[in-house]
Each structure stands twice: as C-alpha cells, then as structure tokens.
Image: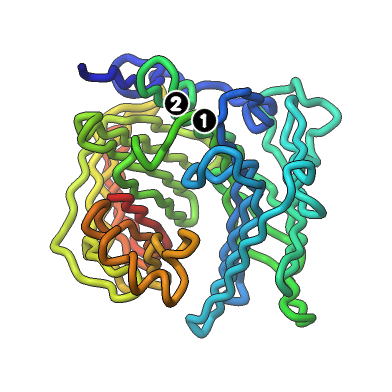
Amino acid sequence: MSIEIVDGWNGPGAKDGKATLVRPADNALHPSEDRWAFEHWYFDARLESGHTVVAFLQKRRPEEPPGSRPVVEVVVYFPDGTRRQVIRHYPHMAFEAATDRCRARVAHNTAELVSPAADVDRPGALPVHRLRVNEGGVELDLTFTATVPSWMPGQGWTRYGDRDFFGWVVPAPRATVTGAVTIDGWRVEARGTGYHDHNWGVGNMPRIIERWHWGRLYTDDLSLIYATVRTQRRFDHHESRPLMLAVGDRVVLSTGEVALTEGPTAYDADARREYPTWLRLESEASGDGVTDARVDLRLDVREVIHGHDLLDDVPVVGTRVGGALLKPLIHRLVGHPGYFRFLSDFELRVTMNGTTRVETGSTLHELVALA
C-alpha cells in the first residue's frame, strides 16, 4: 500500500501564490511526545576573514535513535582549507527551549531572538538572533541581523502518511553577521553574511529520506535558497523541491515546481562514494502576483571541502577495529551513506517580467545521501 506524501504548499499547484507570514512561534520549540520527534536550530556564516562557521543546537539529531541525547555541533572551515569539527552530547536535562520564540539552550550554548523580542506577536519584522556557542576550543558570539524576510515553503512541512512529517522554516534567509569567533584563544572579529533555519518533525528519517541537496547563494541584491529531498524507494522516490528567490528585501518566488538535473559523477575517497559534478535547477514561471519570475541555476563543483562517510558516526563501526570488520558488511546492506559540502561556481539566470539577468559567483552547498 502506497503512503500519501503531501507538501504543504499554499497553491495554486506546488507553489505559493501568496507566501506564508512567518511568526516567531514558527522558530520556537514544537513540543511532541512522540519518541521519533526531532528538532534543531542551525546557523552558518561566511566571514570576511575567509572563515566559514557552522553551528547546530539539537534536541535530537534525526539520524540518531529515539532517546538520544541533545547535541551541539560546531564546524569551522579555515581559509587554508582545513577544518575543525566538534560534536558534543549533553544530558537531556541540559536542553530547554521556549514555545513562543527562538530561545533554545543546550547546556551553556544558546540561540535567541533578541529583536523584536519585546513584541513577538508582530509578524513580518526582520528578526535579529544571537548565537553563543563554546565547545572544543571554538567560541562563537555572533549576531544575525536578517536582511530578507523570514520564509517557509507553503505551510513549512512535508507529511509522509498520517504520522511522520518534516518541518522547515527559514527565519533569516540572509543576514548580516557581526561579533567574534575565538579559536584556541585567537580572536577573529566577525563580519560577513549568514543564514539561520530551523527544522523539526517526527519519523525515522533515514528510513524515509534517500538523499537531499540543499544550498543557497547571494549576489548584491538576489538571495536564493533551494532544497531537493528525495524519499526512499518504499515511498516511491517522491521528490520535494522548494525554492525561494528574493530581490532586495522582497521574496518574489516561492515554489516547488522545479526541475533538477545532475551531471556526471566523480568519486570522493573521504565519503567513499560518488557525487554529481554539477547540478541544474530550473523553475517554472511563477511569482508573488506583482513580479513574474523564473530561475535557471547551474552549479559546477570546484572542490569538495568536506566529504564524510556517515557510517563513521555509528558506534563500533566508526572505530578502527570495528569498522574494518563490520563496515564492508554494512555497506552491502545499506549502501554508502555520505555527506558532502561543496564549493561550486554558479551561473544564475533570473527572468523577471520578461527581462533576463545573469549573475555568476561561487557558493557553498551540500549533499546528504543516506542510501
């Protein structure tokens, strides 16, 4: 029996004729008694110093089993191409979060809406969030001031049958980042461009999701976010493809009517699997009722800056002895799950009201393949 999968677009069709107005509570805790419930808050920033920093505060990682402990994850990509990654689990009592706004804590690490904190019921205001994380010699004290309105695709969820679902809201599709990054006592004044989103849901996601691409890019006045999520074969390889385009401080396109093409593959030894060497995303013409917009994006992978075999994260399998014995067998059973973060060159063609403009540059994006 097939399971019905529904993407929560406002319509008409798989798009938003009118975008959902995001409220502060959408970025708050979504309480659930389900043992498969998960939730996390994500931030990243590309800094003028050449560093890229990434941080998660997680109630439960969706790839971990029920009952798993809260997690703080921090990654720093250095200008010379090296990487520092810290993952720290904490007791359940170390996690708390508000239900009316972003105010999440895992031990001493916090993410919080600081403006308009006094008026959380005023929707549409550009939010300001503060992130404070200190783990493994990496200390982040960063303020994310949104410059593009908060966005979610449709109602912000995809439902897999009657029980399971995945939620996504982007409180800061684009933000100005200020503050400081301190690494082993060495302080970097932080100035750059950032992003903040929030995911929650219920379900055994590795059994539902086969793979996803996710990324975004910025030019002087264009901001684009996309994701393509493909389910496992038992869910008929359903694909959800949300995409957002903003011009300045106005979202002009929110759609799931997007075609994805993947180029020839190459092998990465760190992830122990292949990846597509280019991607192309083409949207159908749509818009906000004022601007008719169409997107044609090509991403050509210049460098794999982070390739990772996800089986290395499994206890015993990730050890030298256990991995040597068990990993070949598990690869035969479940395939080669892997994570990639790419640095790619892009060509973006945007057609608005009959006029086409072309933008080029470089950006980061990721691929998670669970099968």
Residue under label 1, please give it: 201
Q: Earlier in the sequence, mark 1 or mark 2?
A: 2
Q: Look at 46% across and 55% down and name the residue there.
A: 218
In this picture, residue 65 sits left or right of residue 30: left
- Amino acid at circle 2: Phe
| Position of residue 144 measured from the top left corner of the image (x, y, whole percent) | 69, 51
Quadrant of the rendering where the N terminus is positioned: top left
Q: Is residue 290 visible?
A: no
Q: Look at 56% across and 48% down and name the residue there.
A: 174
Look at the picture and state if 10 lies above or below 309. Answer: above
Q: Nearer the viewer, residue 306 or 222?
A: 306
Q: Is residue 358 visible?
A: yes
Look at the picture and state if 59 lies above or below 301. Answer: above
| Position of residue 326 measured from the top left corner of the image (x, y, whole percent) | 34, 65
The answer for how far apart the CA atoms under marks 1 and 2 are is 5 Å
Residue under label 2, please give it: 165
In this picture, residue 40 sits left or right of residue 211: right
Q: Look at the numbered discs 1 and 2 and tell me whether their residues touch, using CB distance below 8 Å.
A: yes
- Amino acid at circle 1: Gly
